[in-house]
């Protein structure tokens, strides 16, 4: 019987060799494709199972991870979720990530290249990989004031520091609570997400930077005025025609002023006054005189046509190409196909406020490793110089007049010089979009605020930027200046 | 079987002790690592745990010194290492379950079962002084074995778990009687074949250079075949079916030395399984899962889809070459990670390297078992040891092959590693039997006889020789035993071995 026993021993060795080959096939040869398989939740669980760093606003955590007793290991939590969701985004087991949770994901989960040394230290000391902290530029007081002032109206508020580009507030309304999407009960998360997704008011959309872009209306007159002053052919006191109606060349269309009124009894206005009372016919004529290319170039200098990452992705604002004369006139007063984001308007105002120097807007102040060492700190950087310091000063003075005695009087604050510009963008078949852009204190501005209220907000068809949006801007400026 | 191969006379207990320390270090080290990696500290019960497993290991070592001093020194440490690794992994999975709020105590129960297994093994070693005694119970073993296999089909106590009806519930405990049945059947097959091997080995016609057995001798293999297919169809368990049939064919081959039996066995089983796969949906589903595991339609089918198998593959793939480290993977994502899929759990956390090391342990274990079979002098012992060594190796093959998609997945559990009392107890008894037989195989028998022959009357008989007559062998065997010893070319074969036992 020993011969078959010896042969059996050989058979066994062959059997085990087959097992070893088969294990090698699974764990080595096929491992990459198995690991990449969409049904393999391990990568997801590995990420969710690690401690994820918090997102900090004003020294307080607004998003953080807590250990829980389930298969994920950590639960993402949000404080004042609806207030900050436009910035933080959500972190969902089912729907992935948005907002800062997405753009700064590798830092938050600890896998970023910048955290390499920290990871090596953790490996040596045997600590689990820990995500880093992201500190935002958002000022909680300003954010809260903006959200409170906007209330339940649909719209957005952006506030930033024109000297640095640091974004102090970014509010969109209606908003959503990311806590609803961060749960580990996938059925509940699905239901919540579907509800938000099919809500006609689009609560998942960040209107400040990435919603549908909006017609700027009279806010665009800032760009047109800047173009005029930059051309050297116009000064604030240059007289412009101000007819009751402006017949556009090539068509039968006529441009009227707001409410069909006349801007001036003698049918002429200075550039400054035209801006102060937001005279359509004057600016339409100015647009015709300047030409579409000059307007387009000036708009591009302010950032139109560029997609930004702050690090959230900002939709590019547009000034249309190849315009004929009537459409140039329409575009000069912010109608036709001009489309902007509230942040883009804030950049225009910011350049004016900062003596012509446009600072790149940003949201992340610092990133700190788990042991609180700073791994990166955002240095303010210049986006460009779209206008000269002289033009900036001239525009500032013109905007001061808007608040003192023009369309933006409801933004005035006692003891503070507020510079502003209203906008009331006509939308065919719907209530107008109400705009207000402002900065203060005018002599040395520390804050730029842009408010957009969709479809007239609480005032509906009767709304103007001055009535609906300016008071909100005022509340935000007060929060920044603590007045 | 008439030849006796030479053995070293070194009993090997010292080596065993050293290897046991190593094996315990592996098991206890793994247990400590699990605690460190999951909770940042050594498990609170590390001392108690280490003492427990050490008492089992050293206790058995002492029993061996006492009752089977020449037993194979590698078998016990190999098993202790595997059992320890299994315990560590089960403890690790308990922690994963506790993290989601399910408090499981699989690890402490497994430790209790290990202790009981050790006690069973010790009892077998103490009570069974000579493995040949078992031959007397050949047909008792048959009845017990068949009874155990049929037990899950008895209404009331048999339960179906995950489609396979291989469990019985008695007094709140679940048992897998097939684990004990393989033991009983190995004894039965050994007893039956050692008696009838001459008839079964008789040659019939020669076809294509292969000596076929006579048609009338096909009875037993057909009977076992029908029985195995019955298990497959009625208990829906391909693994158990394959295990029993494979065991019989292997032992038939050892007994008759005829490869034709293996061929007949393979053809019969493949044909039967193919027929069953076509006729019975549940058997066919196993094959579909095997062949099309990653197909989304097969994956998403529930129940009866490939999700569990594929999750196991995902786990092993994420472990890669070196594994995630104990406690740092997610083996808990695989259903039955502590029992049917403990191999993929270990593959994930210890990597391909660790898995191959574990497979090597099993290979060493079964090779030592076969070495025992080669070394032992009686036919029954050869068949028993060969059968038991094969059945453990074959079970590994079926389990690991199933988990790695080499063959269709079955419901068997990995010996010594997987969670499960029946499996542990039965396999520890197998270890005891192999140790018992190996004691006989490695005893310096020839030397003992020579000493007896040369020693003048009245002188005390040395230990090694004294053990034989007193070992409870039947009269027949005692007569036949010496002839085997004397007949072989003992001295000739001894001389070439430099480390041989000649003083």
Image (tube, coloured by chain):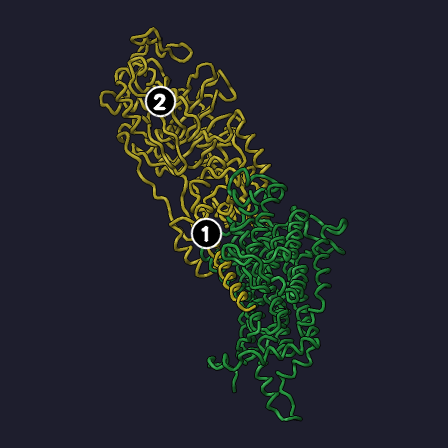
Q: Which mark is residue A25?
A: 1
The lab-note entry on whether marks 2 and 1 share a chain reads yes
The answer, for residue B339, to whether it is visible in the render is: no
Is A437 rendered above or below residue A481?
Answer: above
Residues at marks 2 and 1, CA–CA distance in whole angstroms: 64 Å
Q: Give the x, y percent position of residue A181.
A: 54, 37
Quick one: B179 or B491, which is closer to the camera? B491
Q: Identify the residue at the far front of this view.
A: B205
Q: What is the quadrant of the N terminus of chain A in the image?
A: bottom right
Residue in the foreground of this view, choosing between B39 and B371: B371
Occupied quadrant, residue B247: bottom right
- View extreme (top): residue: A252
Percent x, y of residue B40: 54, 60
Q: Position of residue A231 (x, y in %)?
A: 23, 23
Callout 2: residue from which chain? A
Please give the name of the residue rendered at 64% of the width and 92% of the height, measured from the top-left corner: B459
Q: Earlier in the sequence, mark 2 or mark 1?
A: 1
- Chain coloured yellow in the rendered structure: A
Question: Can residue A383 be seen here?
Answer: yes
Identify the mark at residue B130; answer none if there is no mark.
Answer: none
Q: Nearer the viewer, residue A276 or B20?
A: B20
- Relative placement, left or right, of A415 versus B143 is left
Which chain wears green? B
Q: Residue at 64% across / 74% down in the picture?
A: B59
**Relative to A400, B395 lies left or right:** right
On residue A220, the disc is 2
Q: Nearer the viewer, mark 2 or mark 1?
A: 1
């Amino acid at each position: 019987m020993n011969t078959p026993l010896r042969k059996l021993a050989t058979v066994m060795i062959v059997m085990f060799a087959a097992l070893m080959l088969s294990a090698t096939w699974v764990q080595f040869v096929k491992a990459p494709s198995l690991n990449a398989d969409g049904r393999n939740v391990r990568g997801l669980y590995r990420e969710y199972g690690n401690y994820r760093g918090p997102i900090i606003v004003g020294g307080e955590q607004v998003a953080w991870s807590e250990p829980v007793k389930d298969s994920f290991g950590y639960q993402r939590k949000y404080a004042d979720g609806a207030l900050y969701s436009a910035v933080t985004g959500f972190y969902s087991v089912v729907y992935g990530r948005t907002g800062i949770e997405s753009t700064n994901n590798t830092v938050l989960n600890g896998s970023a290249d910048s955290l390499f040394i920290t990871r090596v230290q953790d490996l040596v000391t045997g600590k689990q990989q820990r995500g880093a902290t992201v500190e935002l530029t958002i000022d909680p007081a300003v954010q809260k004031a903006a959200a409170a002032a906007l209330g339940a109206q649909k719209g957005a508020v952006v506030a930033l520091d024109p000297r640095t580009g640091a974004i102090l507030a970014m509010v969109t309304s209606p908003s959503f609570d990311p806590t609803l999407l961060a749960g580990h009960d996938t059925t509940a998360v699905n239901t919540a997400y579907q509800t938000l997704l099919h809500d006609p008011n689009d609560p998942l959309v960040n209107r400040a930077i990435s919603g549908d872009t909006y017609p700027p209306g009279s806010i665009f007159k800032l760009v047109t005025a800047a173009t005029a002053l930059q051309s050297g052919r116009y000064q604030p006191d240059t007289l412009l025609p101000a007819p009751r109606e402006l017949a556009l060349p090539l068509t039968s269309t006529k441009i009227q002023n707001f409410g069909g009124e006349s801007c001036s009894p003698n049918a002429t206005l200075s550039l400054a006054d035209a801006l102060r009372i937001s005279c359509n016919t004057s600016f339409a004529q100015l647009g015709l005189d300047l030409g579409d290319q000059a307007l387009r170039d000036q708009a591009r200098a302010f950032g139109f046509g560029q997609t930004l990452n702050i690090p959230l992705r900002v939709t590019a604002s547009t000034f249309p190409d190849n315009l004929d004369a009537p459409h140039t006139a329409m575009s000069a007063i912010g109608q036709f196909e001009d489309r902007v984001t509230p942040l883009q308007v804030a950049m225009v105002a910011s350049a004016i406020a900062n003596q012509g120097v446009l600072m790149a807007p940003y949201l992340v102040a610092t990133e700190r490793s788990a042991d609180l060492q700073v791994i990166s700190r955002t240095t303010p950087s210049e986006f460009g110089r779209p206008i000269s310091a002289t033009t900036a000063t001239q525009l500032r003075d013109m905007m001061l007049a808007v608040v003192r005695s023009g369309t933006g009087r409801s933004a005035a604050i006692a003891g503070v010089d507020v510079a502003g510009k209203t906008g009331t963008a006509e939308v065919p078949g719907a209530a107008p979009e109400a705009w207000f852009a402002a900065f203060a204190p005018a002599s040395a501005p520390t804050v730029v605020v842009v408010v957009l209220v969709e479809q007239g907000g609480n005032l509906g068809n009767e709304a103007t930027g001055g009535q609906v949006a300016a008071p909100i801007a005022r509340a935000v400026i007060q929060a920044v200046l603590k007045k | 079987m008439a030849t006796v191969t030479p053995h070293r006379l070194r009993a090997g207990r010292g080596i065993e002790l050293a290897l046991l320390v190593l094996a315990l270090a592996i098991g206890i080290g793994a247990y400590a690592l699990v605690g460190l990696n999951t909770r940042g500290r050594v498990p609170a019960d590390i001392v108690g745990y280490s003492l427990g497993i050490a008492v089992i290991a050293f206790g058995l070592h002492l029993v061996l010194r006492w009752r089977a001093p020449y037993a194979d020194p590698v078998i016990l440490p190999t098993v202790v290492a595997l059992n320890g690794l299994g315990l560590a992994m089960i403890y690790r999975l308990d922690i994963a379950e506790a993290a989601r709020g399910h408090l499981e105590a699989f690890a402490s129960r497994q430790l209790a079962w290990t202790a009981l297994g050790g006690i069973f093994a010790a009892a077998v070693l103490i009570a069974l002084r000579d493995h040949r005694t078992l031959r007397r119970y050949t047909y008792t073993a048959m009845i017990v074995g068949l009874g155990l296999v049929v037990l899950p089909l008895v209404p009331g106590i048999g339960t179906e778990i995950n489609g396979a009806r291989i469990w019985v519930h008695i007094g709140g405990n679940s048992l897998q009687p097939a684990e004990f049945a393989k033991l009983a059947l190995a004894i039965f097959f050994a007893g039956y074949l050692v008696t009838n091997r001459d008839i079964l080995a008789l040659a019939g016609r020669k076809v294509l250079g292969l000596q076929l057995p006579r048609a009338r001798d096909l009875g037993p293999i057909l009977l076992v075949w029908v029985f195995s297919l019955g298990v497959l169809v009625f208990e829906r368990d391909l693994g158990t079916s394959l295990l029993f049939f494979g065991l019989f064919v292997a032992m038939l081959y050892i007994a008759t030395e005829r490869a034709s039996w293996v061929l007949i066995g393979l053809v019969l089983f493949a044909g039967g399984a193919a027929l069953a796969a076509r006729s019975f949906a549940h058997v066919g589903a196993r094959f579909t899962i095997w062949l099309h595991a990653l197909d989304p339609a097969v994956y998403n089918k529930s129940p009866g889809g490939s999700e569990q198998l594929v999750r196991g593959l995902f786990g092993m793939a994420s472990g890669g070459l070196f594994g995630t480290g104990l406690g740092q993977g997610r083996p808990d994502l695989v259903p039955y990670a502590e029992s049917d899929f403990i191999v993929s759990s270990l593959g994930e956390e210890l990597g391909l390297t660790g898995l191959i090391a574990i497979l090597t342990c099993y290979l060493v274990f079964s090779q030592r078992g076969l070495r025992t079979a080669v070394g032992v002098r009686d036919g029954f012992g050869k068949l028993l040891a060969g059968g038991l060594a094969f059945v453990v190796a074959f079970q590994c093959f079926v389990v690991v092959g199933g988990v790695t998609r080499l063959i269709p997945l079955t419901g068997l559990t990995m010996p010594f590693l997987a969670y499960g009392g029946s499996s542990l107890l039965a396999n520890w008894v197998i270890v005891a039997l192999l140790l018992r037989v190996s004691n006989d195989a490695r005893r310096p028998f020839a030397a003992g006889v020579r000493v007896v022959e040369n020693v003048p009357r009245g002188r005390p008989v040395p230990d090694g020789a004294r053990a034989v007559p007193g070992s409870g062998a039947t009269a027949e065997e005692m007569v036949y035993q010496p002839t085997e010893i004397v007949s072989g070319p003992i001295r000739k074969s001894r001389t070439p071995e430099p480390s041989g036992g000649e003083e």
